[in-house]
Amino acid sequence: MNDLQKQHMSRSAIGQLSRSVVGRVTGRFSRVFVSSSAVAATGRFLRRQLWAWPVIAAVLFGGAGLWVHRSVERAMQRQRIDTLTTIIDADVTALQTWMADQRHAAELIASDEQLRPMVQELLATSTEKSGRELIDAKAQTAIRERLGERLKQRSYTGFFLVSPSGIVLAADQDPPLGKALGGYRNEFFQRVMTGQSSVSKPYRSPLLLTDENGELRANVPTMFTAAAVTDDAGKPLAALGLRIRPDDQFTRILQVASSGTTGETYAFDRQGMLLSQSRFDDQLKEIGLLADLPESRSILTIELRDPQVNMAEGRRPKLRRAQQPLNRMAAEAVQGNDGHDADGYRDYRGVEVIGAWRWLPDYDFGVATEIDVDEAFQPVYILRRAFWGLMTLLALCAGAIFVAMLYMARQQKALQKATLAAKQLGQYALEEKLGAGGMGSVYKARHAMLRRPTAVKLLDVDSMSPAAIARFEREVQLTGALTHPNTVAIFDYGRTPEGIFYYAMEYLEGMNLDELVNRHGPLPEARLVYILKQVCGSLAEAHGLGLVHRDVKPANIFLTRRGGLHDFVKVLDFGLVKALEGPEQASLTSANAIAGTPLYLSPEAVNQPDQVDARADVYAIGAVAYFLLTGSPVFSGTSVIEICTKHAQTPPEPPSSRLKRPVGQDLERLILRCLAKARQDRPADAANLLRELEEFHINGRWTADDAADWWTNRPPQKDAKTPTSDGGVATPAKAPTTSIEVTAVFADGKG
């Protein structure tokens, strides 16, 4: 496989399988089967069209430049995120250590045995007398004297002693005595009364407190560390809170580590309010987010809202501050999620930044560290300008040539289609194209003598190669050897005078099981078993001949009406079938290649693809049954690797749990047996599975009359275009008869 193909495959919508999952296999799951004939066709084309070499050189050079550019940018992003993650982890660790020290200090002071009689005296006073008596109580003076020296030693600026009912029993000031706390302060101290020491979030104090300049002001930011004062039996008597100046300690800890000249770390609450001091207070005053007063501070003033413009550049937001949404980081963090963003988002100034964040559930606030994008990626911008200058020159030269080549290719395709439409394939006249897959196209055709509709599958002219022809012939021969009525029938096989290989098969009207569930929802148990028996009958014949289908899935099981029978099943697409004996087939279907569809792969098809047997089809039948019963696949995920890993390692959720309602025990037990991770725990083959289906009890009833009634009264939609199993598009009533949606398989790195 050359570098250009590897690059193309790495950008596919589905992605690559990791080496740890597929070992030496290189390939991708896709609707396009890349065969070795493409390499041969490319070689012939290049020998005839020498003008293509400059285009290829330009594409390769541009691709290499783009790869280098993106690699550098991704490396820079990773480096910056690693740096930010290290900073925030260090800051959070330091903050948690500091808060643990504060809790320990509060516990140590609260455990002073001499405080207990004073607290008990104040508790008795608070139940009988007013706040005036609390002020004049001897215990009040004693507590202040007892705590005064300790508070100074540890830089605490005051204290509160709060009763279980939320009344302030003692404090370093007289005004709050005898008053009940409310809001967050009451919640905090009540939590401490349960015996759990804690540190509060910063909040604005309603009391007159000294600010950093020593002036008495209201609404000064404050916070508490608190612990319970207990009696001799360990029962909490009151909560002792020690006041901390957040801008003196809390903010300073967060500012210990930062990145660059624009980096900062700060804390914020669930409403997005800053709980620590911003490093940009002067800039915030310039852009109008803070009042231009000496005492104005960002702590407990600025909210992390997205102004949707860069206010640092003098732009004004269209929405008022209260109407602006939280920025991307805050909106994610307040949901309790940790994360990072290397692509950039707007901070509270509207400046593009990258950042990392952590949410601390024990304290109900978050911590974020950020740096301006312009500073973070300045080297990338220099590289980007140089790169795009060169790319512009390449694009001007290669663009026109590529467009001309694309136009010529489309014209050639259109000419091939027109030629095919006018040709007779022996006794078959092509009428309309039903779909296209990696190896060829499927047409609706009519036999000249029998006048019956037929589906004809053609091997694409561009796919002509010995390997492609051998694979095509093998599919025909293996499918043609099967005679079960529930297996799609092969009528004819040959090639046109132009060398186009084809085979003719029965044309079916109806829908596949994927379409059935998507249109009409999950199936009742009785109908599910009715269909599964027919599927097992078809595959039992194949298993008896030593063949494994390897691509059993809802899209390859077609539901139709046949000879007066309704809900009649046809198993399609034996293109990936594997002969259990016969090493001569190894070059056609690699024993080391993963084959099938990710949602229905057995664990051994993922981990040991060279050891699949009939029990891999049994696993797929169980997965199909699960889908028909619940309306959803056994496992889902955002990537092929994730789905394959779940098939290999994760136990399936019982259908009854997925549906949240009872399911027939026999049916559920059998489905879960089919989905067993160990092959020996599954039925040995489709014949054994069919016998078990015949024997167990079924909830409900589904007969041929029920099927006929369903098809009569609930016909499939005729107007909805749906993907066929061959990767094309067809109406539900006239879907193609076979599936050629297969996995690209590569034995040793050669397509």
Image (cartoon, rainbow, N blue to C red):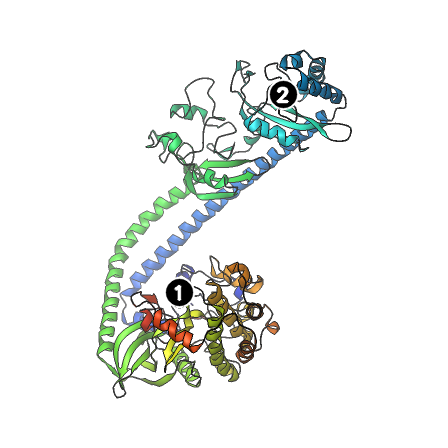
Q: Which x, y percent locates residue 467?
A: 40, 78
Residue receiving disc 1: 520
The image shows residue 145, relative to residue 594, as above or below, that is above
Residue 556 in view: yes
Say which residue appears at 38% left-offset and 42% top-offset.
382
Say which residue appears at 25% left-offset and 64% top-offset.
405
**Dot 2: what SS?**
strand
Residue closer to the observer: 71 or 476: 476
Say which residue appears at 29% left-offset and 77% top-offset.
444
Q: Which x, y percent locates residue 364?
A: 56, 35
Residue closer to the observer: 492 or 666: 666
Q: Which x, y percent locates residue 567?
A: 41, 75
- Judge from the rendering whether residue 305 lies leftward or rightward of residue 602; answer left or right: left
Q: Residues within 10 Å of mark 1 (few under 14, many from 20)?
A: few
Q: Which mark is residue 168?
A: 2
Q: Quadrant of residue 464?
A: bottom left
